[in-house]
């Protein structure tokens, strides 16, 4: 579906609280209070496994509720990134190549799935993420993931592996970009 074919409310923000709409960095901060980048990647990989296999998601400690929490957190993260993508501010997010090299040495983990331009300005990642796929389409796809992971099923014609891989790859890029944004905006100013 082309951007022009979407109805205005499809691209609206639906899961964020008003204060998060005003300051999307609050959600990015919350993401890394909950877990750090490896934890989010591991949860996404586990979720994808249950989407693509004939097994129903169940966490040993928290049951299926942990998947619902992961789903909600990812939707809110995408909506925050969508707002940052459309904002005209870059603040402390954009840095120089020299600062990138220094940052690589300072951080425990540094993204390998971002381009040089995206490392300098992680908001460019959001352009890539939302260029062909709108926020409404990500919401729909992750909603399908949620149902697919919670049901034991035979083959699911609704979810094509190519689409699943694309969403997974884009979410990994989002995690990497927001990790940099988090360190450049939240951690440096604490």
Image (cartoon, rainbow, N blue to C red):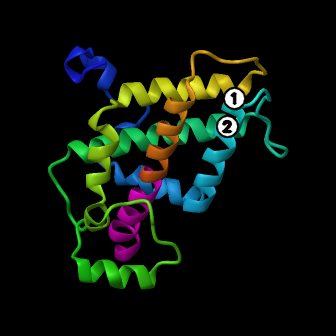
Q: Is residue 175 magenta?
A: yes
Q: How many marks?
A: 2
Q: Position of residue 68 (x, y in %)?
A: 64, 34
> Which residue is label 2 attached to?
67
> Which is more toward the observer, 38 or 161?
161
Q: Quadrant of the N terminus?
A: top left
Provide the secondary structure element on which disc 2 rests.
helix
> Which is more toward the observer, 120 or 76?
120
Provide the secondary structure element on which disc 1 rests.
helix
Given contact means CB atoms under 8 Å apart, are the residues at marks 1 and 2 in contact?
A: yes
> Which is more toward the observer, 27 or 108?
108
> Which is more toward the observer, 70 or 126?
126
Q: CA distance from mark 1 to mark 2?
A: 9 Å
* Dot 1 or dot 2, earlier in sequence: 2
Instruction: Determine if residue 63 is in view.
Output: yes
Q: Position of residue 165 (x, y in %)?
A: 53, 38
Q: Residues within 10 Å of mark 1 (few under 14, many from 20)?
A: many
Instruction: Determine if residue 190 is in view.
Output: no
Magenta portion: prevailing SS class: helix
Of tags 1 and 2, the one toward the viewer is: 1
Image point 33% across, 61% down: which residue? 115
Residue farthest along the front direction in this orientation? 162
Residue farthest along the left direction in this orientation? 88
> Which residue is label 1 attached to?
149
Q: Is residue 137 above or below residue 25?
A: above
Q: Position of residue 36 (x, y in %)?
A: 57, 62
Q: Residues within 10 Å of mark 2 (few under 14, many from 20)?
A: many
Image point 79% across, 42% down: which residue? 59
Residue 184 as seen in the image, left or right of residue 28 = left
> Which stretch appears magenta?
174-190
Residue 25 as seen in the image, left or right of residue 139 = left
């Amino acid at each position: 579906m082309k951007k022009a074919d979407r109805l205005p409310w499809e691209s609206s923000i639906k899961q964020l609280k008003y204060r998060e709409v005003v300051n999307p960095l609050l959600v990015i901060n919350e993401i890394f209070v909950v877990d750090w980048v490896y934890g989010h990647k591991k949860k996404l990989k586990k979720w994808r496994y249950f989407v693509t296999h004939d097994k129903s998601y169940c966490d040993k400690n928290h049951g299926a509720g942990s998947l619902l929490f992961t789903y909600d957190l990812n939707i809110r993260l995408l909506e925050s990134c969508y707002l940052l993508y459309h904002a005209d501010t870059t603040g402390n997010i954009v840095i120089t190549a020299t600062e990138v090299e220094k940052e690589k040495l300072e951080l425990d983990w540094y993204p390998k799935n971002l381009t040089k331009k995206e490392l300098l300005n992680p908001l460019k990642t959001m352009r890539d993420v939302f260029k062909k796929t709108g926020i409404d389409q990500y919401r729909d796809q992750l909603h399908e993931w949620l149902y697919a992971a919670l049901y034991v099923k035979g083959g699911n014609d609704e979810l094509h592996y190519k689409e699943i891989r694309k969403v997974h790859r884009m979410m990994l890029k989002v995690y990497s970009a927001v990790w940099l944004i988090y360190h450049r905006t939240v951690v440096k100013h604490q």
